[in-house]
Amino acid sequence: MAAQIIDGKAIAAKARKALLPRVEALKAKGIAPNLTVILVGDDPASAVYVRNKERAAKELGFLGGVLRLPAETGQEELLTLIKHLNDDEQVHGILVQLPLPGHILESAVLAAISPQKDVDGFHAVNAGRLMAGRPLFAPCTPKGVMRLLAESGIETRGKNAVVVGRSNIVGKPMAMLLLQADCTVTIAHSKTQNLAALCAGADLLVAAIGRPKFITTEMVKEGAVVIDVGINRVGEKKLVGDVDFDGASKKASFITPVPGGVGAMTIAMLMENTVEAAERALAPC
């Protein structure tokens, strides 16, 4: 069988378009959503991600922008800047682009962002709310995956889901969202025994391990839904996912491509989280 390709670009465009009337409604009440992104250093991949976020925000009429800081910026200087943004009522979303230079403690920086402005959904308060089934902001990539499944008409209830990867950014929150969608969820990782057999039994397989083409054809169940979160650079220009797309697409019922799959949704969900933050600022719950 040939898998149906899930068009992340098209679904992301639809999600962004749906935000326009909400943005206009906020502006009619004197509020423009404000997303402020902090980029420390000159990591090339981070610079590309930040430019894409900045472009999406401008297209939706957001205020804010990107604060670009030199790589030698100290941790206390960064924390002081975050406090200033927390205290600024005109700022609704704060995003610190990861990874940070080695001399800055990532956990301290993420903890400094106000949970009400943590549109990435990485703060411990937001992680706890997600665990409790009452998310304020769900992390953008897992939230985007759930939107892809919904828009594609894919049933999750009762499905056996395997998430390969246990990061705080994707793997763990992905598992929580799937659990809340009535999947039976297994989180697999580098120490998992019989990983291939475990994946081959999944109705829904999410690959978020950061290793190019790690998920081979033999690890995909006939008719499974395969979501590839990985973005790996091979050579100078080619991007591939964590899944061997050519092989897996011959067995899966649905599959996301790389690029053109989950990545576009991550930015769309960041925009949606920022709009939600602005709406809450207008009418605090």
Image: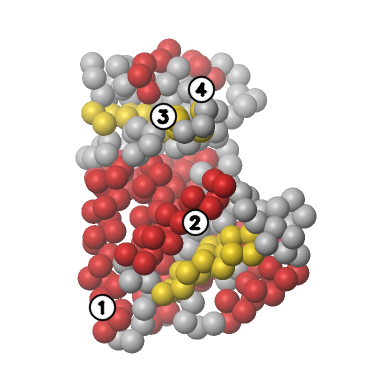
- Nearest to viewer (mark 3 / mark 1): 1
For badge 3, the amino acid type reads Leu
Q: Position of residue 247 (x, y in %)?
A: 36, 16
Element type where label 3 sits in the image: strand
User: Does any portion of residue 265 appear in the rendered image?
Assistant: yes
Q: Nearer the viewer, residue 36 or 177?
A: 36
Q: Evaluate if marks 4 and 2 touch, with contact meaning CB atoms under 8 Å apart.
A: no
Q: Which residue, given by chain and number where applicable, does mark 4 sit on?
A: 214
User: Does any portion of residue 283 appear in the rendered image?
Assistant: no
Q: Earlier in the sequence, mark 1 or mark 2?
A: 1
Q: Which residue is farthest bottom?
A: 30
Residue in view at x 37 percent, y 23 percent? 245
Q: Earlier in the sequence, mark 4 or mark 3?
A: 3
The crowding category of the residue bearing disc 3, from other C-alpha atoms within 10 Å (few below 14, some 14 to 19, many at least 20), is many
Q: Nearer the viewer, residue 77 or 128?
A: 77
Numbered marks: total: 4
Q: Position of residue 21 (x, y in %)?
A: 22, 70
Q: Position of residue 133 (x, y in %)?
A: 45, 55
Q: Earlier in the sequence, mark 3 or mark 2?
A: 2
**Mark on residue 205?**
3
Q: Earlier in the sequence, mark 3 or mark 1?
A: 1
Q: Position of residue 204 (x, y in %)?
A: 37, 30
**Mark on residue 50?**
2
Element type where label 4 sits in the image: loop
Q: Earlier in the sequence, mark 4 or mark 2?
A: 2
For badge 2, the amino acid type reads Val
Element type where label 2 sits in the image: helix
